[in-house]
Image: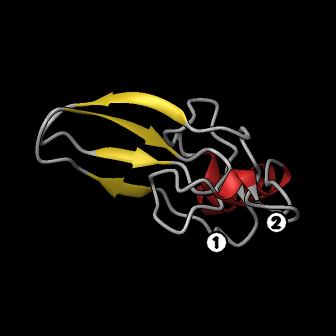
Amino acid sequence: MNFTVSHFIQWVVMTKKLSSMEDMIPNEGLPKVAAAQPCCVQLEAGKNYAWCTCGLSEKQPFCDGRHKKVEGMPYRSQVFTVEQNTEAWLCQCKKTKNPPYCDGSHNQ
């Protein structure tokens, strides 16, 4: 059998797909409660922020893209801005009814 460039490219693509599948996070028990209390942050007017919705980010309460490794990719970061510089309490339990802001749901 002749090993052509086309075969090599197919092999590389298949290997990469299998490797990325092994790194997938099972979609079980999510969203994860990152913390049972909100996080106080200083937000700048006009700046885009990405709030973590899956609870897996290591940069809580903000997204670091880990949701992309959850099987089926059911989570997306929630991008938001504020109109003026402000202090805000952002949810980390992921149960809030007013994302990304804490509404006390972690107390229930």
Q: Residue at x 82, y 65 (%)?
A: 27
Quarter of the figure with the C terminus: bottom right
The answer to whether 58 appears left or right of 11 in the picture is: left
Q: Residue at x 79, y 57 (%)?
A: 21
Q: Which of 77 and 40 is in front in this view?
A: 40
Number of marks in the image? 2
In three-dimensional space, the C-alpha distance between marks 1 and 2, rounded to whole angstroms, equals 8 Å
Give coordinates of residue 64: x percent, y percent: 53, 38
The answer to whether 101 appears left or right of 46 in the picture is: right
Q: Is residue 3 visible?
A: no
For mark 1, give the secondary structure: loop
**Label for residue 74?**
1
Which residue is labeled 2 in the image?
27
Quarter of the figure with the N terminus: bottom right
Q: In this view, does 43 lie above or below 96?
A: above
- Give yes or no for contact between labels 1 and 2 (Cβ–Cβ under 8 Å): yes
Q: Which of 6 and 60 is in front in this view?
A: 60
Q: Nearer the viewer, residue 7 or 18?
A: 18
Q: Which residue is drawn at 54% across and 49% down?
A: 52
For mark 2, give the secondary structure: loop
| Residue type at numbered disc 1 | Pro
**Label for residue 34?**
none
Res 11 quadrant in image: bottom right
Applied colour scheme: secondary structure
> Callout 1 environment at 10 Å: few (<14), some (14 to 19), or many (20+)?
some
Q: Nearer the viewer, residue 66 or 8?
A: 66
Q: Is residue 13 above or below residue 65?
A: below
Give coordinates of residue 98: x percent, y percent: 46, 64
